Image (cartoon, grey):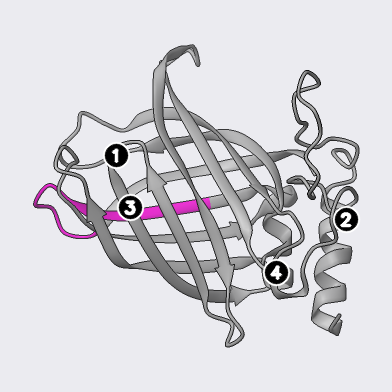
């Protein structure tokens, strides 16, 4: 492990002091698989692959709130989200996010966006992020770390089902911010609008 990798491990350990004993768990009613399971906790399960060290601070389960706004909606609209970033020891991370809309009192209005995918770091420090959305959109992002705790990515390709909205591009910036929270902002070009701010959120680590 490189010196920068050691620093990233130590920094992540300090931020996770209060969540170190939590992890995603398989259903107790199902038999265990004969292969390593996913873990969102660096202290449990398979060892993080060296190829993923640049993404190490992202591993965990995160929850928090944000807002979505766009010229085509009556916004801004408040939402909550749970983001799980896990691994099974291989050179990629699993990504799953689910969101729900909130009213002005913080009560749930309804379920909202879901996405699943994979972070795939490459040897030249390039990061591939492949995402599939419940709205019929498939996206391929490329980017690089901006620092040990921030990552910027932009779409190289967007594929839409026949029933999906006209999405043509997106850009995301993730970063570890105050008190170890994970913040992100997303810009999106869709339904005839140019690339512009769409969503932003601040998530707190709840496991890992």
The residue located at (61%, 85%) in the rendering is 123
Image location (x, y in percent) of residue 159: 25, 56
Return the residue at label 1.
69
The residue located at (43%, 53%) in the rendering is 131
Q: Which of the two labelled residues, at mark 2 and mark 1, occupies the earlier sequence position?
A: 2
Q: Which of the two labelled residues, at mark 4 and mark 2, occupies the earlier sequence position?
A: 2
Image location (x, y in percent) of residue 26: 76, 30
Return the residue at label 2.
13
Residue 175 or 6: which is nearer the viewer?
Answer: 6
Q: Which of the two labelled residues, at mark 4 and mark 3, occupies the earlier sequence position?
A: 4
Tell me if 80 is positioned left or right of 55 in this view: left
The residue located at (89%, 42%) in the rendering is 20
For marks 1 and 4, give the one nearer the viewer: 4
For marks 3 and 1, give the one nearer the viewer: 3
Check disc 2: other Cα within 10 Å, few if <14, some if 14-19, many if 20+: some
Up-down relation of residue 155 to residue 26 (above or below): below
Distance between mark 3 and mark 2 Cα atoms: 33 Å
Up-down relation of residue 5 to residue 13 (above or below): below
**Residue 154 placement: quadrant:** bottom left
**Residue 135 placement: quadrant:** top left
Distance between mark 2 and mark 1 Cα atoms: 34 Å
């Amino acid at each position: 492990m490189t010196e920068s990798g050691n620093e990233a491990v130590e920094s992540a350990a300090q931020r996770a002091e209060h969540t170190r004993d939590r992890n995603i768990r398989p259903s107790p009613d199902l038999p265990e698989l004969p292969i390593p399971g996913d873990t969102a906790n660096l202290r449990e399960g398979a060892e993080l692959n060296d190829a993923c060290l640049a993404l190490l601070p992202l591993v965990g389960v995160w929850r928090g709130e944000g807002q979505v706004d766009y010229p085509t909606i009556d916004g801004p609209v408040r939402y909550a989200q749970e983001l799980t970033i896990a691994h099974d020891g291989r050179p990629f991370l699993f990504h799953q996010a689910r969101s729900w809309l909130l009213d002005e009192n913080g009560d749930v209005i309804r379920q909202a966006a879901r996405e699943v995918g994979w972070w795939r770091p490459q040897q030249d420090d390039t990061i591939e992020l492949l995402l599939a959305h419940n709205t019929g959109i498939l996206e391929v992002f490329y980017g690089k770390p901006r620092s040990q705790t921030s990552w910027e990515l932009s779409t190289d390709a967007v594929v839409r089902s026949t029933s999906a909205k006209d999405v043509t591009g997106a850009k995301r910036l993730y970063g570890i911010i105050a008190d170890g929270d994970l913040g992100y902002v997303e810009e999106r070009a869709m339904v005839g609008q140019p690339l512009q701010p769409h969503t932003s959120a601040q998530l707190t680590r709840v496991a890992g």
